[in-house]
Image (cartoon, rainbow, N blue to C red):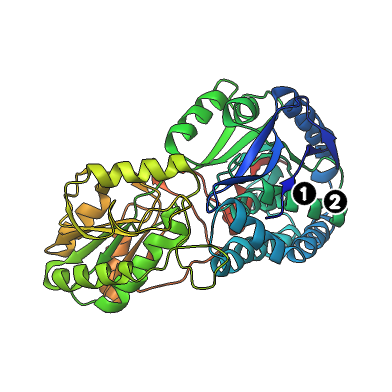
């Protein structure tokens, strides 16, 4: 396996040495071998990056929409040329099967970035209210802190929007999957964007993430990750009254009504729950099924889950890769071990490959809606199936969560939409409606604050000024 070593941060339009000689190893979760490393950044590195972003801000903020749009178009072109390498690196550092890595891990962020290039080129939104001219202006220097499960998409959703809005960025990617971010930095170098508009500092959350969240030169922090870490970042930013955007956890419900296409709803639902080995914040990990179809759904979900092939992410036959780390594997196994519901597929004794951080796709039936596996975000291939008797009960169970990020409803169109409107969640797919990368994305309750993607994602990085005349 080829080793990948990146020894510097990307700051001020150039690769520069870290203030520390310490390095972080990057593990392949399938082979369990360290195949690369990146710098363990320091607060001093963050200072340098914030200074570069601050120095670049005025010029980038005052650039015309045409100039910013053209720059992001060049960036998209340079990143698209690296699509195959992006998929390969994600396969190595995360274990995503290659087919999914190409379509989702590489393809989705390219679509999102192209959208932001178009939005950046549009004239800035202005409106007149009485004697006031209301204008939208970039908020300033953005600190972006991103997770490991979608290592490029989560970066582009923040960086693309912030740059389109006229902001400059300091990025800290997850230390578990940092190498993909370097491909983005390489694309910035090729696209010849102004120095300092994008800066990359790798490192741990306590060292680099905390330094970004609490830095007086950072005007806004955009974070995706766990609810616990999001709360800590909010506290750090609150001390200096900085804006925070948070995309946090989820425990999404997949509601299958009695007039639904049960076979399609279950098969699509299982696929959604297990996408990226269940390491997806929007995963429909609670399958709510009308009692009239409950036994059929349980049997079909168990059969579907048992048909998943686990193995090498670069083997075309593999449908489920390993979890991201040994710690994540043990965390997921802990949830399975403590569960008291009826196990119908997978479990701790199910066969898995002899190497890699694998957990077998697992399905529990007769799950208590208040139980741990129905309430906590597991972030692994674990599905809970829960029966209900009518629409009101389905809505009550679906909303019985501290999270509210996504969900699904299956049934006759008008009825399904009516149920979808009652769900306290940021997005709902009705009868398999496809994910829209240009629609607002974000959550209710402890799933976060703010929205990403499309025009709503761009305005998240702007503030509003009223000019009276």
* Foreground of the two, 145 or 139: 145
Q: Residue furthest top?
A: 239
Q: Residue furthest front?
A: 354
Residue at image point 60% right, 22% down:
240
Disc 2 packing (10 Å; few <14; some 14–19; many ≥20): some
Secondary structure type for disc 2: helix
Q: In the rendered image, which residue does mark 1 sit on?
A: 185
Residue 287 position within the rendered picture, expressed as x and y whole percent measured from the top left = 26, 61
Disc 1 packing (10 Å; few <14; some 14–19; many ≥20): many
Seen in the picture, residue 412 relative to 342 is either above or below; the reply is below
Quadrant housing residue 213: top right
Q: Is residue 462 visible?
A: yes
Q: In the rendered image, which residue does mark 2 sit on?
A: 189
Left or right of 453: which side holds 431?
left
Q: Are marks 1 and 2 in contact (CB under 8 Å)?
A: yes
Secondary structure type for disc 1: helix
């Amino acid at each position: 396996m080829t080793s990948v070593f990146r020894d510097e941060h990307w700051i001020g339009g150039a690769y520069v040495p870290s203030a520390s000689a310490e390095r972080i190893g990057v593990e392949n979760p399938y082979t369990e071998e360290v195949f690369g490393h990146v710098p363990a950044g320091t607060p001093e590195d963050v200072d340098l990056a914030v200074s570069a972003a601050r120095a670049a801000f005025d010029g980038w903020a005052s650039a015309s929409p045409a100039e910013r749009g053209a720059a992001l178009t060049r960036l998209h072109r340079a990143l698209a040329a690296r699509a195959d390498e992006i998929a390969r690196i994600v396969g190595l550092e995360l274990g995503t099967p290659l087919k999914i890595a190409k379509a989702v891990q590489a393809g989705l962020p390219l679509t999102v970035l192209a959208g932001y290039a178009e939005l950046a080129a549009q004239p800035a939104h202005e409106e007149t209210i009485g004697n006031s001219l209301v204008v939208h202006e970039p908020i300033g220097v953005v600190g972006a802190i991103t997770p490991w499960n979608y290592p490029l998409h989560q970066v582009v959703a923040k960086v693309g929007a912030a740059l389109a809005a006229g902001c400059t960025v300091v990025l800290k990617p997850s230390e578990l999957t940092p190498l993909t971010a370097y491909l983005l930095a390489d694309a910035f170098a090729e696209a010849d964007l102004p120095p300092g508009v994008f800066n990359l500092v790798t490192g741990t959350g306590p060292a680099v993430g905390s330094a970004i969240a609490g830095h007086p030169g950072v005007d806004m922090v955009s974070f995706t990750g766990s609810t616990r870490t999001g709360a800590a970042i909010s506290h750090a930013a609150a001390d200096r009254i900085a804006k925070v955007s948070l995309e946090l956890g989820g425990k999404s419900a997949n509601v299958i009504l009695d007039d639904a296409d049960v076979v399609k709803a279950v098969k699509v639902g299982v696929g959604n729950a297990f996408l990226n080995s269940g390491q997806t914040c929007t995963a429909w990990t609670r399958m709510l099924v009308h009692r009239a179809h409950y036994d059929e759904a349980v049997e079909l979900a168990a059969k579907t889950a048992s048909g998943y092939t686990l193995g090498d992410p670069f083997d075309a036959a593999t449908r489920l890769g390993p979890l991201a780390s040994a710690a994540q594997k043990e965390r997921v196994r802990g949830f399975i071990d403590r569960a008291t519901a009826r196990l119908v597929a997978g479990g701790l004794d199910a066969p898995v490959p002899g190497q890699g951080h694998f957990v077998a796709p697992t399905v529990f039936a007769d799950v208590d809606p208040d139980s741990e596996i129905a309430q906590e975000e597991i972030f692994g291939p674990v599905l809970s199936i829960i029966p209900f008797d009518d629409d009101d009960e389905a809505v009550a169970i679906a909303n019985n969560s501290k999270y509210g990020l996504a969900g699904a409803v299956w049934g006759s169109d008008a009825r399904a939409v009516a149920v979808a409107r009652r769900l306290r969640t940021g997005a709902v797919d009705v009868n398999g409606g496809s994910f829209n990368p240009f629609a607002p994305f974000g959550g209710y309750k402890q799933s976060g604050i703010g929205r990403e993607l499309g025009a709503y994602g761009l305005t998240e990085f702007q503030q509003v000024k009223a000019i009276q005349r």
